[in-house]
Structure formats: C-alpha cells, structure tokens
Amino acid sequence: MEARTPIEQAASRRSPDEQRGFEREQVAAHYEHDPEIFSLVLDSQLAYSTGIYLHDDDDLETAQRRKFAHFRNLLQIKPGEKVLDVGCGWGSVMLNLAAGTDGVFHGITLSERQRDVLLERAEARGLSDRITVDLTHVEDLDLAAESVDAVIFCGSIVHMHNREAVHRRVGDILRPGGRLLISDCYFPTEPRGPRDSNATDYILSKAMGYCRLMSLPEELELIGRAGLDVRLVEDMTGSYVRTVADWIDNIRRNRARIEALAPGFARLLQCYMTVGRTSFARRTALEYMILAAKGHADTAPKHWAVTDAR
Amino acid sequence: MNTDTITDRESVASAVCDIIAETLNIPRAAVGKDTGLDSDLGIDSMALIETQVAIEERFGITMLDVDEMEAREPKTVDDLVDVVLEQMAAVKH
Ligand SMILES: C[S@@+](CC[C@H](N)C(=O)[O-])C[C@H]1O[C@@H](n2cnc3c(N)ncnc32)[C@H](O)[C@@H]1O
C-alpha cells in the first residue's frame, strides 16, 4: 500500500508496536480536550463526523439525525445483536443506535474523557444496560472470532495506520451475516494536489495527531481480502463540506468561550476545518460511507435509501 | 478620506503586521504594509488561512473563504488590509 504523505512514510518506518503507541498518544490528545468545547462546535449529539444533507435549508442537527436514521437502516440491528463501535467518540452513533434498536453495544476509544462522557450520557438516557465502553486501541481488541454482528467505524478508521491488520481483525470477529459500516475520508486515486504541503501536515498531523488517507479502491480491496463483500458505497463529500462549514460557524459564534476553556484551540480547530472544508469542496479529499457484509446478511437495497424521516 | 479612516487603517494595518509576524514566526520589523505576501514572505495557503483566522479572532469579523481569497489575489500586506477593512464595514452595516 502506498504511503502518500510524509507522516505516513514516517509511520511506515515505525514497528507496528511503536506506531500503535504513537497513535494511542497523538490521536488521543485531540479528543482529550474539554468536552464542553466540542459541545460548542458540534451538534447536540456530539457527532464528530459527517452528517447527511439533503436540502438547502438543512441544519447540522437535522443532518446528523438523518445520518443516525440512515445507519439504523443500513445495519438492520436485531434484538440482542452485538455491535462494536470502533472509535466511538462521545457516543453519538452508539447512543442513537442503542435508543433506536434492541442491540447491545460496545464502544472503544483512545480517550479516557470520551469514555467517561459516553458512560454518563448512557446512564442519563437509561441505556447503561446495553452499552459498555473501553479505552482500547483497535489492534488490542480481545474479541473471539465470529462474536460480533456489526462493526462501525464512523470518522475513526482514518486514524489507523495499520489498515490491513484492522480489516483482517474485523473479518475475523464478525460472525457470518455480520455487517461493517465505515464513514470516512479518502484521497482521490490520482493526486489532485501536493500531499506534502503544510496544509496537509496541519490537518493530518498537527491537529488530528495521525491520519492515513487511503484511496477508496485500496480500502475496498482490504475489505474484500478480509472476506467481506462490499454492498454499498455512498459519496458524502458534499455533505461533509456542509457539516464542516456548520462547525466553523459554531466556532465563530462561540469563540470567546472556547478560548477561555483552551487558549489557542479555537484557532487550531478553525484552521484545520478550513483546510478540510476547502479540500472536500475542491474534491482533493473525498468522503465516503461504505457498507460491507460477511456472507448472507439482511441488508438490501430496500434499506439503503437516505430518507427524510426525522 | 478623513483622518478617522486613516487612523483606523493604520491601526488595522499595524495589527495585521503583528499577526503575520506572529503566524510566520518572523521579526515584526520584516513586515510592513508594502511587504509582498508571496514575493517577500513566501506565505503559502496554510499560513494565509492561519493569518485569516487570527484576524477573525482579533477583530471579531468573518474573513473571506479560501476561494474568495484566491480570487482576490492579494499581493501585499496592504491588499490584505483592504479585505479586513471591507469585512469590518460589512459587520457594521
Ligand atoms: C472523529 S472521532 C469520531 C467519533 C464518533 N464515531 C462520531 O462519529 O461521533 C474519532 C474517534 O476514533 C477514536 N480512535 C482513533 N483511533 C483509534 C484506535 N486506533 N482505536 C480505537 N479508537 C480510535 C478516537 O479516540 C475518537 O473517539
């Protein structure tokens, strides 16, 4: 697999163990910031990933709610099914899927603060009996083969360098009929601009700790090699442009408060989001949702339309 | 132009120079209103974004987005000051 950016090339020179340690530290740092800051930037569910915009007047809240509903449709979680949310953040996806299904959810994150917030929110919503969270790097997951019904990576897989190992792992822990859902960013297959610029480094390294943007075909190839079938790929690039634009507006509105909580962080957020927004608007970076399944799975075209139901 | 505007313009220009020097981590004396953003300072797109965000913080305004800024092709610090003043006026009206 191609190492496209200087930070990926540096990662390729580390041993897998070293890289895991690097990600644990560098990636967590971003998410360890005061959760109140993120509540001033993101939607009410603290979704730190793209929403789905259909109409010109959709706001962030609507777009995120539409995404949760869409995920529920795509994943078709049955009562008692076990769902693993890799990179669960403060729980936007898990909490909404738990409320809308009778599945059992396990989340992992690299940030202790995120775990604590998620557990509090689960408690407040009366969902504690179906939600657990661990501070675990995905490569350290200790799950039996064929023990999970669905795996979600929403805005998280981009932080993982060792993608082949991650996909092999997912292929292993999913039971036959299991589903995999990924929502994240990719580089176009052919470069449309420099990948060693200061802007690239700012967003992928300085702001986010570590990111590896592959091309979509590379990710699909790894999913296939892990024994899964890709069922659906959706381009969400336009929606991500709007999501990030709404986040930037929130930073502008709440700058003083964010600054008081963490001096300099509002600037870092706005700078990296501006780079992101411009890259997605110019399609030098792309956002996709990918649905895959292991063998026969109950997810079919009739479940896949993005609906307006709010 | 009345004196008020000139004073405004000068204090804004001076603040913009401060911000550029701080963003690029160069001596303040290296930045004046005729300094070329690219020709003298070699500002790249990232540094321009950082500068714009710092300007937003300092003046409580909304600067241009990246496409709009590229269309303006600001050559000197003074060109950037023009944009700041326009955006300040846009807030007032
Ligand atoms: C952008 S946030 C997305 C949060 C959430 N899925 C959402 O959509 O709101 C990325 C999350 O991935 C987690 N993460 C990144 N790398 C990880 C890894 N190697 N193992 C486990 N979690 C990871 C981070 O801790 C963070 O919670």
Image: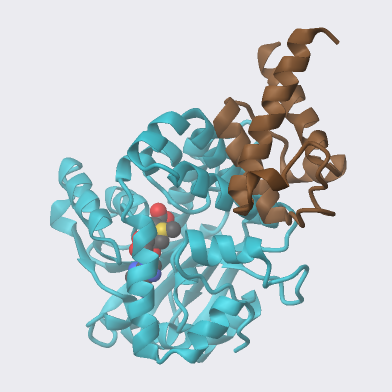
Residue A235, how many percent across, how many down? Answer: 65, 60
Q: Residue at x 82, y 7 (%)?
A: B2
Could you tell me which quadrant the N terminus of chain A lies in? Answer: bottom right
Q: How is the image coloured?
A: by chain
- As drawn, the residue found furthest toward the front would be B29
Front-most of A291 and A160? A160
Q: Is residue A239 visible?
A: no
Please indicate, yes or no, whether residue A152 appears anywhere in the rendered image: yes
Residue at 63% across, 31% down: A57
Residue A257, horizontal then vertical, whole percent: 39, 31
**Residue B23 picture location, percent across and down:** 60, 49
Is residue A296 toward the left or the right of residue B54 in the image?
Answer: left
Chain letter for the part of the structure drawn in brown: B
User: Which quadrant of the structure image shows residue B34?
Assistant: top right
Ligand 1 occupies quarter:
bottom left
| Chain A: drawing colour | cyan
Q: Is residue B77 above or below residue A50?
A: above
Q: Report the side of A209 relative to A52 (left or right).
A: left
The residue closer to the viewer here, A137 or B17, is B17
- The answer to whether residue A235 is left or right of residue A136 is right
Number of labels in the image equals: 0
- Is A133 located above or below residue B73 in the figure? below
In the image, residue A17 sits, relative to residue A207, either above or below, namely: below
Depth check, front residue: A148 or B10: B10
Where residue A91 appears, x then y in whole percent?
31, 53
Residue at the (26%, 67%) spot, across then down: A81
